[in-house]
Image (spheres, grey):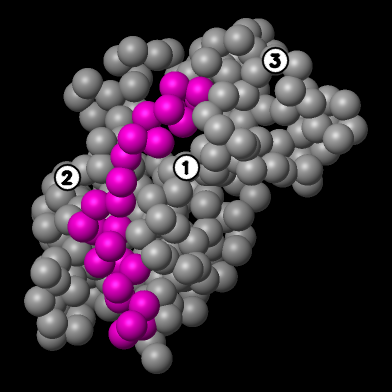
Amino acid sequence: MKKLVVLTGAGMSSESGIRTFRDSGGLWEEYDVTEVATPEAWNRNRDLVLRFYNERRKQLADCKPNEGHLLLAQLEKHFDVQIITQNIDDLHERAGSTNVLHLHGELKKVRSTLDENLVYLLNGWELRLGDLCEKGSQLRPHIVWFGEPVPNIMAATIMVRHADIFLVVGTSLQVYPAAGLMQYVPLHVPKYLVDPEAEPHYFVPNLTIIREKATDGMVKFTAAETGLPGK
């Protein structure tokens, strides 16, 4: 069975109602990213940071996987599907995908500020000041903030090096280090880029560009690689 490695970004989840940072009307127009998504912000104003992520969890509870998520899960019937996602939601898992690597953390999880290996599934949507880990330190969102290292990037690099097909959905490949993963895919491997704004800023061999939203692009990809209609 061929190994299909998929990199997904914000555009994958936006059709489920997840607000993105960069798009018009996105979160960056409402929040200064340096005030809610950096270690310095956490040290400066924990109340604000906790409120921001609590709002994101409440929103996520009302969202459902879209057709693009469901199609990716169904592709496990045809491929060994490995998903690398920049998204912090759990929509891939809820759609039925069984192999998902989160590059930027997971919204529904929290971790110790004393020991980063102590990670917990949050019960409910609210994380508060005074919620402590088993070692007595404040819990923080299990999110990779701007300025922090991306622990799973090496695992992601290994995955793309062994891809038989590489698919990018819902990201214009502007955010590093994830954007650099394309450069580790073997030259001969077929590559697909699904995004309305897709415009690689470097040459990529064997690349097919599908300038569509994630759901419509996934239908076209599924038809191209399986010969089956995406719906």
Q: Which residue is mark 1?
A: 88
CB within 8 Å, label 3 to label 1: no
Could you say which disc has been placed on residue 129 in the image?
3
Q: Picture coordinates of residue 70 (x, y %)?
A: 28, 62
Disc 3 versus disc 1: distance between alpha carbons? 21 Å
Please report contact status of discs 2 and 1: CB closer than 8 Å, yes or no. Answer: no
> Observer-nearest residue: 74 or 222?
74
Task: Say if 149 sits above or below 178 in the image.
Answer: above
Q: Residue at x 56, y 70 (%)?
A: 158
Residues at badges 2 and 3 in contact (C-beta under 8 Å)? no
Residue visible at 18% across and 74% down in the picture: 222
Residue 159 visible in the shown view: yes
Q: Which residue is mark 2?
A: 197
Determine whether, in the image, residue 160 is placed left or right of residue 135.
left
Q: Residue furthest bottom?
A: 1
Question: Disc 2 versus disc 1: distance between alpha carbons?
Answer: 22 Å
- The magenta-colored residue range is 53-79
Q: Is residue 114 left or right of residue 148?
A: right
Helix, strand or loop: magenta stretch: helix
Amino acid type of disc 2? Glu
Q: Is residue 92 magenta?
A: no
Picture coordinates of residue 212, whole percent (x, y): 12, 53
Residue appearing at x 80%, y 32% in the figure:
133
Under mark 3, the amino acid is Leu
Residue 13 percent coordinates (x, y): 30, 45
Q: Reading the chain from its start, which is encountered first: label 2 or label 3?
A: 3
User: Image quarter for residue 69?
Assistant: bottom left
Label 1: which secondary element: loop
Image quarter where the C terminus lies is: bottom left
Secondary structure beneath label 2:
loop
The amino acid on which the numbered mark 1 sits, given as a three-letter code, is: Ile
